[in-house]
Image (cartoon, rainbow, N blue to C red):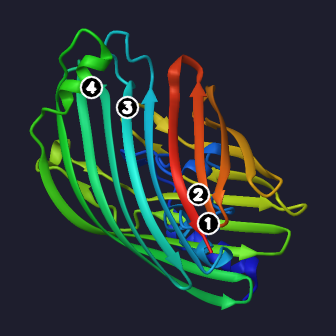
């Protein structure tokens, strides 16, 4: 089977033209990826591939590791509480080898949403993910990968209180939460055509649900993203990612497209930048910048900063990344 036919077959098998209800945005972790605007599905060639594209582990070095921390903001935190404003944090650690990866991540999101009576309520999801990644080469240059995860999540939903959005989001952490656990699965494929790479990932195949009440439960529904990367010369990467389905974060519909680039300057510095926007609301693009500094051979310190109009999509993060 040709590479093109396999990619089409995977997409047809897992995609559905329905809106999906999810809480954590895709761009919640990965300092290098987020420095490129989130255009990373076809680039993923380090230990963060276990999140962005498990099949990408085969494109990197035999051993890699990463540990990182991120902060995210959505909307004006100092204004009055209104639906759509939120904030989040994440931490992630991973080890990657050929053909196995291990990962642990914590993702926390607080968001103001429209309540059942039209008022503003708070919604929170705090998850911990324990993952094992497995790779399989189909033919030279074509790899499929999967990350099996056990996800333990605590969800809450209730009336917000506070003079500002920041106060309301802070108090949402005190809401009673129902804790549940579930297994989940990400599936991905990477086609390496030397100067062009094509990646596809479908996250949350098992669509885990968190919360102890059906009417307020939070579901991580299936998300699909396609990526294309061009490597015209050594040290230069240009990339594009596009969501193949629409997700509903309760703060609005979301279907992202991202463009990014990365280049090395000498042996100790890499710089990157990108832009992404929601195709359902193209008026608020998010621009990003990032850099990596080699602490020593095989060990990099990564950082990024992102900012959108009206503080939509503001974020920052740092990571320590190793590859040998």
Label of residue 146 in the image? none
**Image quadrant where one finds the N terminus:** bottom right
- Which of pointers 1 and 3 lies earlier in the amino acid sequence? 3
Residue 153 in sight: yes
Q: Comparing marks 1 and 4, which lies closer to the viewer?
A: 4
Residue sitting nearer the eye, 44 or 219 = 44
Q: Which residue is mark 2?
A: 225
> In this image, 281 relative to 2: left or right?
left
Q: Are marks 3 and 4 in contact (CB under 8 Å)?
A: yes
At x 53% / y 17%, what residue is drawn? 310
- Gap between marks 3 and 2, in whole Å? 23 Å
Q: Are marks 2 and 1 in contact (CB under 8 Å)?
A: yes
Q: Quadrant of residue 102?
A: bottom left
- Which of pointers 2 and 1 lies earlier in the amino acid sequence? 1
- Gap between marks 4 and 2, in whole Å? 30 Å
Q: Give how far across and how far down residue 266 sits, in percent.
A: 83, 54
Compared to residue 45, the image places residue 87 above or below, namely above
Q: Quadrant of residue 234?
A: bottom right
Q: Which residue is mark 4?
A: 169
- Gap between marks 2 and 1, in whole Å? 6 Å
Q: Comparing marks 3 and 2, which lies closer to the viewer?
A: 3
Q: Give how far across and how far down residue 150 sits, in percent.
A: 28, 69
Q: Quadrant of residue 35?
A: top right
Q: Which residue is mark 1?
A: 200
Q: Give how far across and how far down residue 70 sits, in percent.
A: 45, 42
Label of residue 87 in the image? 3
At x 79% / y 58%, what residue is drawn? 267
């Amino acid at each position: 089977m040709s590479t093109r036919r396999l990619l089409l077959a995977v997409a047809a098998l897992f995609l559905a033209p329905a809106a999906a209800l999810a809480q954590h945005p895709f761009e919640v972790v990965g300092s290098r990826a987020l420095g490129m605007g989130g255009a990373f599905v076809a680039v993923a060639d380090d230990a963060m591939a276990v999140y962005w594209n498990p099949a990408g582990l085969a494109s990197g070095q035999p051993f890699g590791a990463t540990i990182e921390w991120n902060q995210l903001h959505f909307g004006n935190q100092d204004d009055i509480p209104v639906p759509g404003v939120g904030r989040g944090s994440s931490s992630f650690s991973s080890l990657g080898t050929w053909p196995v990866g291990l990962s642990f991540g914590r993702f926390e999101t607080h968001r103001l949403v429209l309540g059942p009576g039209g008022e503003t309520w708070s919604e929170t999801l705090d998850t911990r993910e324990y993952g094992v990644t497995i790779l399989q080469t189909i033919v030279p240059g074509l790899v499929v990968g999967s990350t099996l995860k056990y996800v333990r999540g605590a969800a809450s939903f209730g009336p917000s209180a506070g003079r500002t959005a920041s106060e309301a989001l802070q108090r949402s952490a005190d809401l009673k939460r129902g804790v549940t656990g579930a297994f989940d699965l990400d599936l991905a494929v990477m086609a390496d055509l030397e100067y062009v790479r094509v990646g596809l990932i479908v996250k949350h195949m098992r669509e885990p649900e968190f919360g102890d009440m059906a009417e307020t439960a939070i579901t991580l529904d299936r998300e699909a993203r396609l990526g294309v990367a061009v490597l015209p010369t050594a040290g230069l990467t240009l990339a594009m990612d596009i969501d193949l389905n629409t997700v509903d974060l309760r703060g609005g519909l979301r279907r992202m497209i991202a463009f990014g680039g990365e280049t090395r300057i000498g042996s100790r510095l890499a710089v990157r930048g990108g832009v992404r926007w929601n195709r359902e609301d193209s008026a608020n693009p998010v621009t990003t910048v990032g850099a990596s500094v080699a602490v020593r051979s095989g060990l990099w310190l990564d950082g990024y900063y992102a900012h959108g109009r009206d503080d939509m999509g503001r974020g920052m993060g740092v990571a320590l990344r190793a590859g040998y």
